[in-house]
Amino acid sequence: MATNTTYEALQTLKLNGMADVYAELVAQGGRAPEDPNQWINHMVAREKSIRDEKRLQSRLRTAKLRDTNATMDTVDLNVKRTLDHTAFEALRDGAWIDAHHTVLMSGPCGVGKSYLACALGHEACKLGKSVLFFRMPQLFSDLVTAKANETYDRLFNKIFRADVLILDDWGPDLMTPTQRRDLMEIVEARYERKSTVITSQLPVEKWYDVIGDPTLADAILDRLVHQAYRFDLDGPSMRKTSAEVAIEPSKIRKSSFGSLLSKSAYPANG
């Protein structure tokens, strides 16, 4: 009776992980540890694990990453390519987020920019950071809608508060005056307070032209490029080679995945 009461009390308190471990230990009978501290340690560890996983899944749902399967562990570092493994792995510990640095990724379509950005976003969620993912066209569209619905301040504050903001697919269309003003507001609000990841098919040097206004372009890029980790990617489309492998695996040589060139420029104080 006491056993059932304890189990039910744990469930009532929504300590389901602890309740499950308690039931497992009771079921072990004489095989269960006699030291009550070990019982408590096992129960607390299970409860913490369950709650950590729930918090992670909540952060991932809020982030709305484009590729939900992308993680630092699923990035294939064994594929023959010149991705700077050391530079990319150095971002795993999240120190760049705590230092409010940016990550800039450029390269042709299909080279893996979005996947790498989502992997960084997933790792940030694991570290307990809040993440938001936007394709640039989606961001500008959402801002227009928010202004029309008088919810702009709420959306802007949500973007500002995110520990990591991922902006995917910068360019190539020239920004409108409204878009570059909105981007300036976001970049200015987050500068040296939060971290941003940007991907683009255009090299960073071409972003100036996309913004269009010289004054705003200088202000925006100065804040983004300062203290940025840069990955300038090059190589064939990984989507194309993956499709070829799926269709005719026996005819595709391992080397056909091509190379993915990555250069990283560490911040001066990084």
Image (cartoon, rainbow, N blue to C red):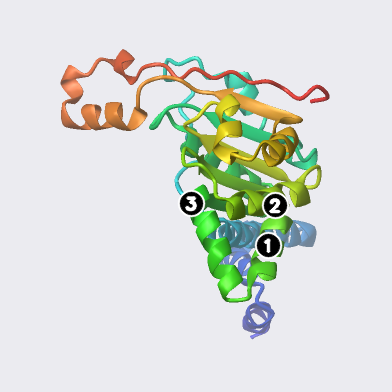
Residue 80's x, y, as percent? 42, 15
Q: Which residue is mark 1?
A: 156
Confirm or deny contact between disc 2 and disc 1 (CB under 8 A): yes
Quarter of the picture holding the N terminus: bottom right
Label 3 vs label 1: CA separation?
16 Å
Circle 2 — which element?
Answer: helix
Residue 165's x, y, as percent? 64, 48
**Amino acid type at mark 3:** Pro
Q: Which residue is mark 2?
A: 186
Indicate which disc residue 137 carries. 3
198 sits left or right of 243 in the view: right
Q: Is residue 203 above or below residue 167?
A: above
The residue shown at (54%, 46%) is 175
Quarter of the picture holding the C terminus: top right
Q: Nearer the viewer, residue 143 or 119?
A: 143
**Amino acid type at mark 1:** Phe
The residue shown at (62%, 66%) is 17
Q: Nearer the viewer, residue 21 or 230?
A: 230
26 sits left or right of 160 in the view: left
Q: Residues within 10 Å of mark 2 (few under 14, many from 20)?
A: some
Q: Residues within 10 Å of mark 3 (few under 14, many from 20)?
A: some
Q: Nearer the viewer, residue 243 or 211?
A: 211
The residue shown at (45%, 45%) is 69
Say whether disc 3 or disc 1 marks the residue closer to the N-terminus: 3
Label 2 vs label 1: CA separation?
8 Å
Q: Residues within 10 Å of mark 1 (few under 14, many from 20)?
A: some
